[in-house]
């Protein structure tokens, strides 16, 4: 890691990154979550900090913490906590990167006591969570840049471009699931960047630090003053 990068492209810029998984409580001892490690979010945070940005990471529980000492960390668990923390920061941000793996649904009710087993089957009723990126996308001002991620298993490019539009992103990063060396817990990744203006760029399988630099380059190349 190079904290003293000569390139200070993002000097003084306020950057919000959501990172890691969310945990949706079922009862006091159980939750619904996913395999997100937070490695990509941490790599992005380090990359922005190295280029002079003031970085704010809203971090899901158990996700990898960025180590650069100037990075502000806002620990959260559920999607609704992640939304609340992100929303508070949003107005004063220049760039927002939605790297978190947010649970789409959460248990409708959190049981106050540990649920005891009974019967041969059980059902938990789930409710749709707030879409953090889409919601903040509606509040996006002209000077702000929003970057999202997509993870698809079919019609990847089509779905990624659809999310770019729907969530008012300027740039979306499509994670390749089908590639060896790309994915959740790994230190490497392979991505395709799609910009609002129609440009497309596919990377090789690279360490997440290099993928992060590529994403920063993609942001720099957007037709927005930064
Ligand atoms: N996202 C978010 N809040 C949510 C769900 C997703 O901020 N409740 C963000 C993710 O951080 C990511 C982007 O939206 O940047 C796309 O996430 P993804 O799960 O691929 O998209 P969804 O809209 O949830 O669609 P799908 O049904 O394919 O899961
Ligand atoms: Ca989802």
Image (tube, rainbow, N blue to C red):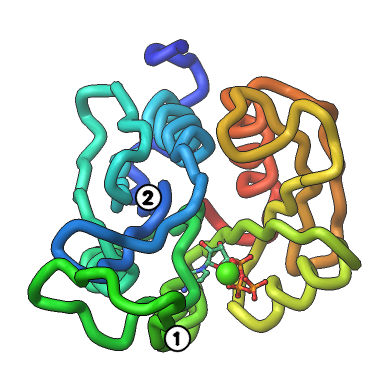
Q: Name the residue under label 2.
A: 15
- In screen coordinates, is 43 left or right of 23? right
Point out residue 72 in the picture as x, y percentages from the top left corner: 21, 41
* Position of 101 relative to 155 (above/below): above
Residue 84 occupies quadrant: bottom left
Q: Is the distance from the Cβ of mark 2 to the nearest ligand 1 atom less than 8 Å?
A: no
Q: Nearer the viewer, residue 143 or 212?
A: 212
Q: What element carries label 1?
A: strand
Numbered circle sitting on residue 128 = 1
Up-down relation of residue 111 to residue 200 (above or below): below
Is residue 21 in view from this perspective?
yes
Where is residue 88 drawn, in percent x and y? Answer: 20, 70
Q: Position of residue 21 (x, y in %)?
A: 41, 52
Nearest the eye: 50 or 100: 100
Task: Residue 141: name its quadrant.
Answer: bottom left
Is residue 15 toward the left or the right of residue 30 in the image?
Answer: right
**In the figure, is residue 176 to the left or right of 146?**
right
At x 61% / y 27%, what residue is drawn?
Answer: 186
In the foreground, 63 or 73: 63
Which residue corresponds to the image point at 45% horizontal and 11% vertical from the top-left? 2
The residue depicted at 51 percent of the width and 45 percent of the height is 35
Q: Residue 11 carries which label?
A: none
Q: Residues within 10 Å of mark 1 (few under 14, many from 20)?
A: few
Does 53 sit above or below residue 91?
Answer: above
């Amino acid at each position: 890691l190079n904290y003293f990068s000569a390139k200070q492209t993002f000097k003084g810029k306020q950057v919000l990154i959501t990172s890691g998984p969310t945990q949706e409580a079922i009862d006091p001892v159980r939750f619904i979550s996913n395999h997100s490690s937070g490695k990509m979010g941490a790599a992005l945070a380090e990359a922005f900090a190295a280029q002079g940005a003031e970085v704010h990471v809203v971090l899901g529980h158990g996700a990898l913490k960025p180590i650069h000492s100037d990075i502000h960390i806002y620990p959260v668990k559920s999607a609704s906590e992640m939304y609340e923390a992100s929303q508070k920061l949003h107005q004063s941000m220049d760039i927002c990167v939605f790297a978190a793996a947010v649970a789409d649904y959460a248990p409708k009710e959190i049981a106050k006591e540990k649920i005891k087993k009974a019967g041969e089957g059980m059902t938990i009723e789930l409710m749709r969570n707030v879409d953090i990126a889409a919601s903040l996308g509606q509040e996006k001002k002209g000077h702000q840049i929003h970057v999202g991620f997509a993870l698809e298993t079919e019609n990847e490019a089509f779905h990624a471009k659809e999310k770019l539009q729907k969530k008012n992103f300027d740039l979306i990063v499509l994670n390749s699931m089908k590639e060896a060396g790309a994915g959740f817990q790994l230190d490497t990744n392979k991505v395709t960047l799609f910009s609002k203006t129609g440009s497309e760029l596919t990377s090789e399988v690279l360490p997440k630090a290099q993928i992060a630099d590529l994403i920063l380059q993609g942001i720099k190349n957007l037709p927005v003053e930064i």
